[in-house]
Image: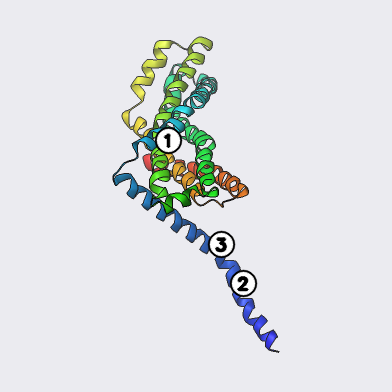
């Protein structure tokens, strides 16, 4: 009889736990992310500054990503020119190809595709690197030596990602414009003067600012996710691999979500 009463008491608690546990997990994760963000930002403004670690992060995140970003940018620009020319030709506006390519690259394709490339290359590398440091007890050893891992490991890599993203997006847009010009002028016969002059007259400073702001926000989000997942990865090979996967998925979804929000704000 007592067992039956206990089972009846446990049933409501089991239902409540089933409903509340996912929400509690989300709240705990959000709190953990905010705490990590706050501590990281504090270490960015408190001396001594780790310029050496920051430069190493910039070299790894930025310089080593230039080739893949530029290669993707030139082909994106070439495809954009083909598709844009086909569309504009229906309205007799082929000379506006330069304007269409510039606005698309500066405001959308440049920041978004660069951020996705960043998440797939640099973000996963940062997560696996920090996760491996967690698995091999390097972060624990730093704490035992009174060295804050967030200060020495997380903060320089976080800042490096935030600074490198707008620069990489700029490289993507510039190379993409030359790819669009190559196809539009050389292959499709658009007048070179019209291509560049209409682009210069139509593109305004606010269009450039929109692309820079988007790429900076994407860099902040992707860097934060990469550092967070690596820092809180399970200290096993499977745990590091799972954290790397979560980095790519979460970064990609968040990039598209933030892109919509920022686009709505700039309109």
Query: For mark 1, what is the residue?
Result: 57
Quadrant (top left, top right, bottom left, bottom right) of the C terminus: top left
Horizontal arrangement in the rendering, residue 153 relative to residue 13 (left or right):
left
Q: Is residue 59 above or below residue 88?
A: below
Give the alpha-carbon distance from disc 2 to disc 1, as whole Å.
47 Å
Of pointers 3 and 1, the one earlier in the residue sequence: 3
Q: Nearer the viewer, mark 3 or mark 1?
A: 1
Q: Is residue 214 visible?
A: no
Q: Which mark is residue 22?
A: 3
Residue 26 placed where, x, y %?
A: 51, 59
Q: Residue furthest bottom?
A: 1
Helix, strand or loop for disc 1: helix
Residue 39 placed where, x, y %?
A: 37, 52
Residue 81 placed where, x, y %?
A: 51, 20
- Relative to the observer, which residue lies in front, 175 or 129? 129
Query: For mark 2, what is the residue?
Result: 15
Q: Is residue 105 above or below residue 133?
A: above
Task: Residue at 56% x, 51% y: name it.
Answer: 235
Horizontal arrangement in the rendering, residue 78 relative to residue 144 (left or right):
right
Helix, strand or loop for disc 3: helix
Of pointers 2 and 1, the one earlier in the residue sequence: 2
- Relative to the observer, which residue lies in front, 77 or 152? 152
């Amino acid at each position: 009889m007592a067992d039956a009463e206990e089972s009846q008491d446990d049933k409501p608690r089991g239902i409540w736990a089933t409903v509340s546990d996912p929400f509690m997990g989300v709240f705990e994760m959000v709190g953990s992310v905010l705490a990590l963000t706050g501590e990281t930002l504090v270490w960015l403004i408190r001396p001594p500054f780790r310029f050496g670690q920051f430069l190493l992060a910039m070299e790894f995140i930025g310089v080593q990503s230039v080739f893949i970003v530029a290669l993707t940018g030139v082909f994106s620009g070439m495809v954009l020119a083909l598709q844009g020319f086909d569309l504009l030709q229906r309205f007799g506006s082929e000379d506006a190809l330069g304007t269409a390519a510039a606005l698309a690259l500066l405001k959308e394709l440049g920041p978004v595709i660069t951020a996705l490339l960043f998440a797939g290359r640099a973000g996963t590398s940062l997560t696996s690197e920090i996760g491996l440091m967690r698995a091999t007890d390097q972060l624990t050893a730093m704490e035992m030596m009174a060295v804050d891992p967030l200060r020495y490991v997380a903060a320089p890599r976080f800042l490096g990602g935030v600074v490198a993203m707008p620069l990489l997006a700029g490289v993507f847009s510039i190379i993409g414009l030359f790819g669009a010009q190559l196809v539009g002028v050389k292959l499709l016969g658009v007048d070179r003067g019209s291509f560049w002059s209409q682009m210069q007259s139509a593109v305004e400073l606010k269009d450039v600012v929109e692309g820079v702001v988007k790429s900076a926000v994407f860099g902040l989000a992707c860097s934060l996710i990469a550092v967070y997942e690596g820092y809180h990865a399970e200290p096993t090979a499977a745990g590091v691999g799972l954290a790397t996967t979560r980095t790519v998925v979460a970064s990609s979804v968040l990039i598209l979500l933030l892109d919509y929000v920022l686009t709505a704000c700039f309109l």
